[in-house]
Structure formats: C-alpha cells, structure tokens
Amino acid sequence: MSRNAGASEAPQPPTDESSERTPMSGPNTNYDPVEVAALDPAQIDAAVEQALAAAAAAGSLEELKAVRTAHQGEKSALALANREIAALPPSAKAEAGKRVGQARGRVAQAFAARQGELEVERDERILVEERVDVTVPALRRRPGARHPIELTAQRLVDAFVGMGWEVAEGPELESEWLNFDALNLGPDHPARQMQDTFFLDPVDSGLVLRTQTSPVQIRTMLDQEPPIYVVAPGKVFRTDDLDATHTPVFHQIECLAIDKGLTMAHLRGALDAFVRIMFGEETRTRVRANYFPFTEPSMETDFLCFACHGAETWGTAEQCRTCGGSGWIELGGSGMVNRKVLRTCGIDPDIYSGFAFGLGIERALMLRHGVQGMHDMVEGDLRFSQQFGMGA
Ligand code: FA5
C-alpha cells in the first residue's frame, strides 16, 4: 500500500495506546466536545469541586502543596482537559476553551486564597511560638575557675622558668626504687611502712603511688648531665586521713640544682627567691637542722611570718594567729644533695654539688589565705576557687 493510500478517507481518531485509555478527540469536523470525557462539563465541574474541597481541607501549607499537584499539576483532570482543546475542531475550541479556562481559573483562585489564609495562620503561629521575652533575665554561665593550688604551682614554676630553670615531670605511679632506694631511704626507713605509703598489688610489684616529688630528682639526674636546674610540681599520695592539716592526696613542688661549686649560700638564695614569689618581697628565710636521707646536711626551712613580719608576739595579748607568735612559719624540707645520691645517679660528688628543697602547696596556700581547714582545699567547691579572685 502506498503512503497516501486512504488519505481521502475521513480522518480517524488516533489509535495509539494512550488514546485507547483516555478518549481523545481527532480532527473530526463532526466532533462534539461534550462526547469527549475529559471535556464533559459534568466531569469538569466535578474536578473543580474536588479541587476546591481539597484546597479547603488542607490544614497546612505543606498539605496544600501536596494536594495542589493532584488538582493543578500536569496530570490533573483539568490539565488533561486543557490539552484536549488543542485537538478540537476550530468551531468547538472557543466554547471548550472558555469552560476549561474558567474551571482552571476557579481552582487557581481557590488555591491562591487558601495559600494566603494558611500563610497568615503560619505567621501568627510563629509570632506566638517564637516570641522572645526580652524581660526574662539572661542565662548566666558562671565561668569556671582554676584551682588556687594549680595557680600557685604555675606561678612558682613560671618564676623559676624566668630565672632559667627547667620544668621536670615524673609519673604518679612510681617505682619503689626511685621513690625510696635511690633517695637513700633504706628498706627499714619508717616512710616505707604500709601505714604511710600506698603500695600497689601485688606488694612485690615494686610500684607505689609516689609519696613525694623527690623521685623526680633521681629521674632528672639519671637523664641529664649537670648543670641541672629543675623545678618539679606534682601530685603525691600518703595514707594520711583527711583532717585540718592533712589530706591523702596533695601537691608538692620540688627544686633541684646540680652544678660545680654550689653551696648552702646558693640554697638560701633560692629559698629566699621562692618565698618572695609566694609570700611577698618583705619575707626571708631561716633554716634549722633536720634530717632527710637524701640531703646532707638537711634543713627545715622557715620563712618570716607575712602577717606579723617576725614580731615575737608569743604569750602576748596580740599573739599572731598566723605563726602562733614565733614570728616564723615552717615552709618545707631542704638540704645539700647527699653525695651517696649523686653517686647513685652517676654524678661525681667531687666535681659537682647540689641542693634541693620541696614543700607542700596546700599547706603554703592555707597559710597564705588563712584557710582554716584542708577540707576547703580538696572539696572542689567552685566558690572556694572564686573567692581568691583567681576565677576564670
Ligand atoms: C618531703 O616530702 C621531702 N621530699 C621534701 C624535701 C625535698 C626535703 C627536697 C629535702 C629536699 P616532708 O615529708 O616533710 O618532706 O613533706 C613536705 C611537705 O609536704 C610538708 O612540709 C607539708 O607541707 C606537706 N605535707 C606532708 N604531708 C602532707 C599531707 N598529708 N597533706 C598535706 N600536705 C602534706
């Protein structure tokens, strides 16, 4: 059959699959738009009614958006009817176009009106829900505060670093040998008793919670060649009960100097520098004989009472409450490093000498700030840190 065969016959409706599912008009001069289902006025009215009902029922802008596609989108009944118009004979187009156009206009208007209403509702809701009461007091975040113990240790360390000393550190879990033996505390020394020291299970593990910062001296001397000038702050542990002047966990700060020609005069100078940083320019130190196995000679260091400035008020009506009237306050232990300890660390005591001193930071702070009991020091109450003006 030629391509033009049947060209003179009356035009037929399209026969593709979609046209079978949905009645479509063909270029038929006898075509009546009423017979095309999509253009049936009753169907169009029904589509409009459904669209108006759906728009009215939408309770939110999201719901409206969802139903709008079904009634105004490309696959909606009215969009389909609109497409049908193109295929109508010219005589039928105007009437069908008017009917469909009016229907689409009503739907569009209804959706726009509902959208307007829902936007007003949303804005009113936001104004209520997100209302900011500017009269409500602001949430005040209290700044944290570094603990006075930490700040004091830092201040002392900074001052010694400023004089050229280095910071040394050691572990809190320490070997018994470094905590005791190397410091010349023999097996029978009282400090090694179970009632003073936290030993680790099993007891023959050779490990303890360090009872002093002095093992950092040994670690440093084993690790470095003289000259050595180090300051070592840290936490230490003893089996003391918590009372007004004792706590089982406290802080010490240790200073060690090893060099050629160091004497007790240098030790006194370092101690004076130390107490001036801690208690002010006017103070000074005095030393008394004492015993520590790792220093020889050993001394207890006192410093001039910062409250009464050394006035001997003992037994008088004005007896100083800070020093008890003696005019002096005990600071901590000190001494020239024992030759035996130097030798243990491989340092020749005929070439080098050295001094060391150590003190408890809590006790020094209690004195400095008139804190009545150790409990305040250790309980971690933020108000305690803040009352020294050391907050944030
Ligand atoms: C020592 O611990 C020596 N290592 C100090 C030393 C270093 C001497 C270098 C010589 C050379 P002592 O046991 O005295 O010494 O303790 C030092 C300080 O720790 C005391 O003066 C005291 O201020 C503080 N201290 C001791 N026990 C406690 C405790 N349970 N609670 C709070 N502070 C304490």
Image: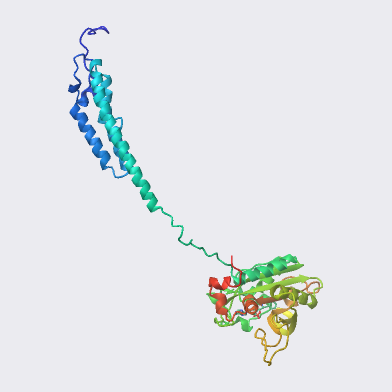
Q: How is the image coloured?
A: rainbow
Which quadrant of the figure shows ligand 1? bottom right
The answer to whether 166 is drawn above or below residue 244 in the figure is above
> Left of 104 or right of it: where is 293?
right
Judged from this view, the residue extending furthest toward the bottom is 315
Q: Quadrant of residue 152?
A: bottom right
Instruction: Name the foreground residue: 332 vs 370.
Output: 370
Judged from this view, the residue extending furthest toward the front is 135
Regarding residue 222, the answer to whether it shows in the image is no
Instruction: Name the foreground residue: 215 vs 28.
Output: 28
Q: Quadrant of residue 316?
A: bottom right
Quadrant in which the N terminus is drawn: top left
The answer to whether 333 is drawn above or below residue 17 in the figure is below
Residue positioned 73% across, 65% down in the render: 162
Residue positioned 27% across, 33% down in the render: 107
Q: Quadrant of residue 286?
A: bottom right
Residue positioned 19% across, 29% down in the render: 43
Q: Position of residue 5 (x, y in %)?
A: 24, 7
> Left of 275 or right of it: where is 81?
left
Quadrant in which the C terminus is drawn: bottom right
Q: Position of residue 311 (x, y in %)?
A: 73, 86
Instruction: Name the foreground residue: 123 vs 297.
Output: 123
The answer to whether 226 is drawn above or below residue 17 in the figure is below
Instruction: Name the foreground residue: 367 vs 56.
Output: 56
Q: Position of residue 322 (x, y in %)?
A: 66, 83
Residue positioned 25% across, 35% down in the render: 51
Q: Say how many tags the image has.
A: 0
Q: Position of residue 148 (x, y in %)?
A: 61, 71
Regarding residue 66, the answer to whether it shows in the image is yes
